[in-house]
Image (cartoon, helix red, strand yellow):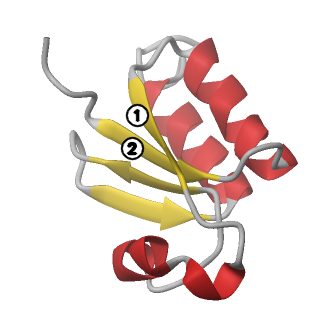
Amino acid sequence: MTDPEITLYRLQACPYCERVVRKLDQYELDYESRFVEPMHSDRNAVARLTGKRSVPALRDERTGVTMSESGNIVDYLDRTYGEAAAGGS
């Protein structure tokens, strides 16, 4: 089995992160969760990825997209993997 193409950087019990998790689960997408440091100033892996230290942050190897902010990520997942992407109405 190959590694998931989507990586989600998140915090435990973060409601914004859980919003993204629910959307990933809705579309039955395989993803890897990487839990980041609780201290904002220690989130160097996220900063290297997105230029920001905020979570959630998502990297989609399939499309080459890297982004942060839960609303942006949910919109991206809807556009990329939702019914509109599949040709639904």
Q: Which residue is disc 2 drawn over?
A: 7
Q: Residue at x 45, y 81 (%)?
A: 44
Q: What x and y, as percent, mark residue 14?
A: 81, 49
Q: Is residue 47 left or right of residue 75?
A: left
Q: Residue at x 67, y 39 (%)?
A: 20
Q: Residue at x 50, y 11 (%)?
A: 28
Mark 1 element type: strand
Q: What x and y, as percent, mark residue 17?
A: 71, 46
> Where is 81 relative to 55, above or below?
above
Q: What x and y, as percent, mark residue 52?
A: 54, 83
Give residue 18's quadrant in the image: top right
Whether tag 1 and tag 2 are in contact, CB under 8 A, the answer is yes
From the viewer's side, name the closer residue of 37 and 80.
37
Q: Is residue 48 left or right of residue 21?
A: left
From the viewer's side, name the closer residue of 12 and 46.
12
- Amino acid marked by disc 2: Thr
> Where is 83 relative to 7, above or below?
above
Mark 2 element type: strand
Of the two numbered discs 1 and 2 on the same chain, state the one appearing first in sequence: 2
Q: Which residue is disc 1 drawn over?
A: 32
- Amino acid marked by disc 1: Glu
Decide: few, some or many residues near mark 2? Use Cα within 10 Å; few <14, some 14-19, many ≥20.
some
Task: Tell me the CA gap for discs 1 and 2.
Answer: 5 Å
Quadrant in which the C terminus appears: top right
